[in-house]
Image (spheres, rainbow, N blue to C red):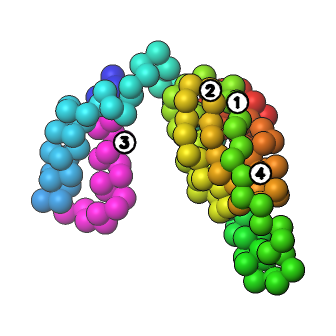
Amino acid sequence: MYRIATFVLLFGIWVIFSGQFDAFHLSLGLLSSLFIAFISSDLLFLNRSKSLGARFVEVVKFPGYFLWLFWEIVLSNVHILKLALTPGDIKELDPSLVRIKTDLKTDFGKYVLANSITLTPGTITINVDGDQMLIHAISKHTASGVSSDTMEKKVANVFEGGGN
């Protein structure tokens, strides 16, 4: 079942991105997708205890998380730009290391959280060790954003079925 789901996903992506609908390209996409699904379906569905229905819910919820993260990145860019271009704001620079404890249970949830933090300007995830994350923040404002659990709740809502 997982190989079929992997095949359908890969072939759908092939058709969308190739834009070619002749027999040669469709058969090439079909064969490529079958081969890749056969050798790598266990990579895509590593945690098989999660049903395909639960994975579908993740796919449906992810665009909302992505849009929220995009907006957070825009706001952080504005903050960093303000710090860089306003002469008096240089005093607000206060680089610090922030250690947070996450309640996320899955490695994938922690992975998404760590990368989301790093994608947000002004913060970099330095280390993830169990449920602890070490993050570098460029200012008190960015450090307080990391310390709040808003992003963690958003990740939990999408990838662990909890949160807000």
- Disc sitting over residue 9 in the figure: 3
Magenta-drawn segment: 4-23
Q: Residues within 10 Å of mark 1 (few under 14, many from 20)?
A: some
- Residue 69 screen position, x and y as percent: 67, 54
- Mark 3, residues whose alpha carbon is within 10 Å: few (<14), some, or many (≥20)? few
* Secondary structure beneath label 4: helix
Mark 3 or 1 closer to N-term? Answer: 3
Amino acid residing under circle 2: Asp
Q: Which of the marked residues, 2 or 3, is nearer the chain's N terminus?
A: 3
Residue for badge 2: 131
- Earlier-in-chain disc, 1 versus 2: 1
The crowd level at tag 2 (other Cα within 10 Å; few <14, some 14-19, many 20+) is some
For image coordinates 29% across by 38% down, the residue present is 7
Res 157 seen here: no
Where is residue 20 shown, x and y percent of the image?
25, 65
Q: Which residue is mark 4?
A: 143
Whole-number angstrom distance, CA of label 3 to CA of label 1: 35 Å
Task: State the SS at label 3.
Answer: helix
Task: Choose the circle earlier in sequence order: 4 or 1.
Answer: 1
Q: Nearer the viewer, residue 45 or 137?
A: 137
Residue 101: give its label. 1
